């Protein structure tokens, strides 16, 4: 077990009345790609700024590479930042922007030249060294910002919504470049985003934030498939949440009785849950099928909405008075399958393992 | 955007004519041969020639230029510091006081500013024997005090347009505040500082009231000479001088405009 | 270190050369005038303190009239400037975008030309043998030259002319920021142009009206050059009286009391202006 590269220990920060970080503890491992994910205003950018040193925590410690940096100013911390606005110095050329941090370290001139060339090659901007930032395209500016921050060979790179200023096509392109860059350099990236697609496709680990607190962390797949709260279940992708109570156990499965509509549903057992506990059963729309295959979780219902959306078809099915479930079915060529219309009576089912039992 | 109806265009034309016609006529009449300033008697540049030989006016002009350059430089330094403090330092003790002190001179009637500063100089001189004879130094202090507020406004406006992340980026890349200021903020403020300096220079060159109060008997600035000769009656030399003032103002405006244009690059988004 | 210098330098300078002088003015307004150098008794000695200058301020008809005239003339001049400036600013804000920069520039340029010179230009125009009277007589409209100069008419004209840019610029700034879709929405909902203007544009431009009016009113009240060069003996304004007390009568305590009175009169408008500016800056 190696020591974490960055560790936040009980960090809190408030701005006047607003609590931006509330007792957050989090670690970043060497070489990992961590995404801080959450809606705007949840405190994810504050967390990044606390690591970078632009804001000081009111409580808690921050350690980077074995050194307590809690009281160190940003210019003495071994991490660098890619800003949401890029913050390229408008009066300096691309090369001078990249050289800025190296000059602060008083590196010899030949080494600065060498690093500039190395960085320009890394972000494929060899021909643009003499240009000013306002002469570059959005994507090029983004790459200069990356090169400038990486030139100092930081222990970790902090990225604050770095793709949000780009249009969609460029954003997807840059995603691939970022992932490749991180793999090649092997340094830790801490990436702040509100875009769950971005977070899931880039990060090795997600940290989902909610109202200044860390809600859940783990690999994308684990967080997606095993959410620990209704908030995470519904923030990452979509989830049907069925409110109910634990009604007992049957054949190694948990039985849940819904609050409205008297349904009995089966879910993976959790010994920690006593009978009568209030729970929510979360089931993702793509895990609910229209073909039942004799699953024990088979329900009958009426289609209330049916929408063809290209790659999938989406349905809303009323399974009991006031209980609606969303489901989506992939549309594959050559698989006509059943495409019920609104008003049709259907049977729906999901494998028991696909349901997550949540208590909050 | 819909086009302006004729009534509005007429109002616009009237407004600009009102603003410019008197000054244009003044310039035309500065080339009048006649001594009677309002009767046209043929084209002549004689009043410009007489102006160039008028020692009193030339001395006053040199004093005014010296005062304007010195006070503008002082005001630029103080206004830079004040503008930075208000736009970038967040909360600090005395912030409200500094805000008020930097805003009040903008709206203070000149007679109040002039009188109060003179009384300060007189009282100080009585108590500590400084500043002694009033003249260049006291006018410079007075003009620098009022121009500081204008420079601070311009500096603050520019800083508000600059992405605050630029300074954070400099810190992030290893530059402590002093080096971040010299390497990033100051170069980006150069156009604003130049525009502020020009404005301070113009305000000083233009000021009659405050200079009249704070100047001693030995020091006479250009506006003071103009004022006393205008009080005695209209003079064709003043017409010529006035035209030169307008020309100088146009050049300064053009310079300031060019600086602001240049400064527009690098503002956020 | 840098922080301390940047806050301290302007703070100390302005306290010494802007705030402290007003304390001294207040002090000198409380002592009697002397025929000496300097011409007043020491305000440091409480035995000298007296309210005589302020009694004079309230009881002397000339002073009272000068304050009243200044307020009245500044008020009418502000109203006239608003009537001329509003349509100008409105037309500027509605002009095609590529013209707007130039139009704004043309309003700013006079601000950079000498105030004294601009007032002087009107002296040329308004005197009995000046261009306006020559033109009127040449056209046979009047037989005798009109007494345009040296009077309230000329003072109003001078104030409006000198301070018009201060009215137009804040008005333009608010009008230009108005979303044109608001007017379109008003038309869409059935308001005719004049109605839409009264119910949408005008209320939304009130901050600009207030800021511009105060920027014209405040300096007009204390103005010296314009009443001195363009005004007559009929309606003296406070700025000129203060100047005369100081330079001609050498009654420094009286001038100081007038200054305190003027500041007291202007305190409310100055604070109002700063409140408007603060609200505009925060939105």
Image (cartoon, coloured by chain):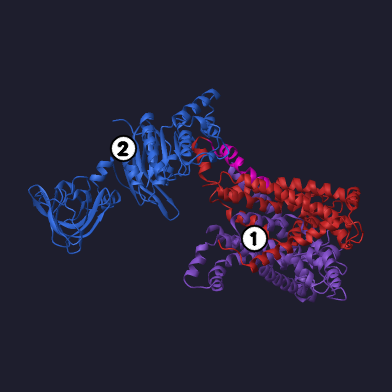
Out of A86 and A54, give the one closest to the viewer: A86
Do the dots labelled 1 and 2 sit on one chain? no
The location of residue C11, given as percent across then percent down, is 64, 51
The residue wearing badge 1 is C169
The location of residue C267, given as percent across then percent down, is 66, 66
User: Where are the magenta residues, as a range?
Assistant: B175-195
Secondary structure mostly taken by the magenta-highlighted segment of the chain: helix
The location of residue A48, given as percent across then percent down, is 41, 42
Q: Colour of chain A?
A: blue
Q: Is residue A161 left or right of residue B255?
A: left
Per the rendering, the mark at residue A204 is 2
Q: Colour of chain C?
A: purple
Q: In the current view of this chain or complex, which residue is farthest to the top? A: A110
Out of C190 and B222, give the one closest to the viewer: C190
For image coordinates 74% across by 53% down, the residue present is B203
For image coordinates 36% across by 38% down, the residue present is A7
Q: Is residue C210 above or below residue B46?
A: below
Out of A315 and B57, give the one closest to the viewer: A315
Q: In the current view of this chain or complex, which residue is farthest to the right? A: B35
Q: Secondary structure at mark 2?
A: loop
Task: Identify the subunit bearing mark 1.
Answer: C
Q: Secondary structure at mark 1?
A: helix
Residue A233 visible (yes or no): yes
Residue C118: quarter of image: bottom right
Q: In the current view of this chain or complex, which residue is farthest to the front? A: A334
Q: State which chain is coloured red.
A: B
- Inspect the magenta stretch and tell me whether residue C86 lies in it: no
């Amino acid at each position: 077990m190696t020591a974490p590269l960055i560790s936040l220990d009980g960090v809190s920060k408030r701005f006047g009345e607003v609590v931006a970080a509330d007792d957050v503890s989090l670690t970043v491992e060497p070489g990992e790609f961590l995404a801080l994910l959450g809606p705007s205003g949840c405190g994810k950018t504050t967390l990044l700024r606390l690591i970078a040193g632009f804001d000081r925590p009111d409580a808690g410690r921050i350690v980077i590479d074995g050194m307590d940096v809690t009281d160190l100013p940003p210019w003495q911390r071994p991490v660098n930042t890619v800003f949401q606005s890029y913050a390229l110095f408008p009066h300096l050329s691309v090369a001078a922007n990249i050289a800025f941090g190296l000059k602060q370290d008083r590196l010899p001139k030949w080494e600065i030249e060498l690093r500039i060339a190395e960085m320009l090659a890394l972000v494929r901007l060899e021909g643009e060294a003499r240009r000013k930032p306002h002469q570059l395209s959005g994507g090029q500016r983004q790459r200069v910002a990356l090169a400038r921050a990486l030139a100092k060979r930081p222990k970790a790179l902090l990225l604050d919504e770095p793709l949000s200023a780009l249009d969609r096509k460029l954003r997807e392109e840059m995603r691939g470049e970022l992932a490749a860059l991180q793999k090649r350099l092997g340094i830790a990236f801490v990436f702040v985003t509100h875009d769950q697609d971005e977070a899931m496709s880039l990060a090795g680990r997600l940290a989902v934030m909610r109202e200044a607190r860390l809600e859940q962390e783990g690999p994308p797949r684990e967080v997606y498939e095993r959410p620990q709260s209704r908030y995470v279940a519904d923030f990452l992708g979509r989830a049907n949440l069925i409110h109910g109570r634990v009604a007992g156990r049957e054949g190694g499965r948990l039985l849940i009785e819904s609050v409205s509509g008297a349904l009995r549903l089966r879910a993976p057992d959790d010994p920690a849950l006593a009978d009568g506990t209030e729970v929510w059963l979360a089931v993702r729309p793509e895990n609910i099928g229209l073909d039942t295959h004799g699953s024990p979780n088979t329900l009958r219902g009426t289609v209330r909405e049916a929408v063809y959306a290209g790659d999938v078809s989406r349905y809303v099915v009323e399974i009991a008075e006031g209980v609606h479930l969303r489901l989506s079915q992939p549309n594959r060529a050559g698989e006509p399958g059943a495409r019920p219309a609104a008003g049709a009576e259907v049977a729906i089912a999901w494998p028991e393992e696909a349901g997550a039992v949540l208590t909050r | 955007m819909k086009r302006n109806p004729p009534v509005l265009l007429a109002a616009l034309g009237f407004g600009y004519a009102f603003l410019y016609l008197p000054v244009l006529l003044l310039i035309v009449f500065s080339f009048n041969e006649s001594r009677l300033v309002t009767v046209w008697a043929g084209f002549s540049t004689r009043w410009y020639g007489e102006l160039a030989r008028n020692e009193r006016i030339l001395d006053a002009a040199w004093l005014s230029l010296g005062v304007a350059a010195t006070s503008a430089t002082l005001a630029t330094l103080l206004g830079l510091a004040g503008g930075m403090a208000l736009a970038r330092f967040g909360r600090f003790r005395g912030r409200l006081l500094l805000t008020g002190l930097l805003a009040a001179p903008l709206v203070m009637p000149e007679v109040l500013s002039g009188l109060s500063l003179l009384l300060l100089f007189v009282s100080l001189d009585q108590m500590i024997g400084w500043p002694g004879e009033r003249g260049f130094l006291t006018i410079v202090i007075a003009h620098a005090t009022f121009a500081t507020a204008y420079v601070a406004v311009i500096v603050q406006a520019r800083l508000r347009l600059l992405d605050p992340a630029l300074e954070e980026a400099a810190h992030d890349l290893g530059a402590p505040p002093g080096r971040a200021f010299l390497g990033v903020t100051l170069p980006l403020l150069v156009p604003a500082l130049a525009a502020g300096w020009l404005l301070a220079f113009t305000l000083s060159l233009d000021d009659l009231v405050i200079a009249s109060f704070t100047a001693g008997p030995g020091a006479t600035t250009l506006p003071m000479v103009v004022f006393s000769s205008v009080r005695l009656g209209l003079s064709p030399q003043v017409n010529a001088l006035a035209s030169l003032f307008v020309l100088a103002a146009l050049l300064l405006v053009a310079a300031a405009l060019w600086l602001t244009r240049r400064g527009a690059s690098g503002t956020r988004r | 270190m840098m922080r301390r210098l940047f806050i301290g330098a302007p703070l100390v300078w302005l306290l010494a050369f802007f705030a402290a002088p007003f304390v001294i003015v207040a002090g000198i307004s409380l002592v009697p005038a002397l025929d000496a150098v300097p011409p007043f008794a020491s305000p440091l000695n409480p035995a000298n303190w007296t309210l005589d200058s302020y009694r004079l301020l309230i009881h002397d008809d000339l002073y009272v009239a000068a304050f009243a005239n200044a307020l009245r003339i500044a008020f009418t001049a502000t109203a006239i400037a608003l009537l001329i400036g509003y349509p100008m600013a409105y037309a500027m804000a509605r002009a095609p975008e590529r013209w707007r920069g130039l139009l704004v520039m043309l309003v700013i340029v006079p601000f950079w030309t000498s105030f004294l010179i601009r007032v002087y230009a009107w002296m040329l125009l308004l005197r009995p043998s000046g261009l306006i009277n020559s033109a009127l007589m040449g056209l046979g409209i009047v037989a005798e030259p009109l007494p345009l100069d040296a009077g309230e008419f000329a003072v109003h004209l001078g104030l409006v002319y000198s301070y018009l840019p201060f009215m137009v610029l804040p008005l333009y700034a608010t009008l230009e920021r108005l979303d044109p879709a608001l007017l379109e929405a008003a038309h869409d909902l059935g308001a005719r142009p004049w109605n839409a203007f009264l119910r949408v544009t005008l209320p939304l431009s009130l901050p600009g009206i207030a800021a511009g009016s105060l920027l014209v009113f405040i300096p007009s009240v204390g103005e010296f050059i314009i009443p001195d060069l363009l005004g007559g003996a009929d309606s003296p304004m406070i700025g000129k009286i203060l100047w005369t007390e100081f330079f001609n009568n050498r009654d420094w305590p009286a001038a100081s009391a007038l200054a305190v009175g003027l500041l007291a009169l202007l305190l409310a408008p100055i604070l109002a202006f700063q409140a408007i500016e603060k609200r505009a800056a925060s939105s």
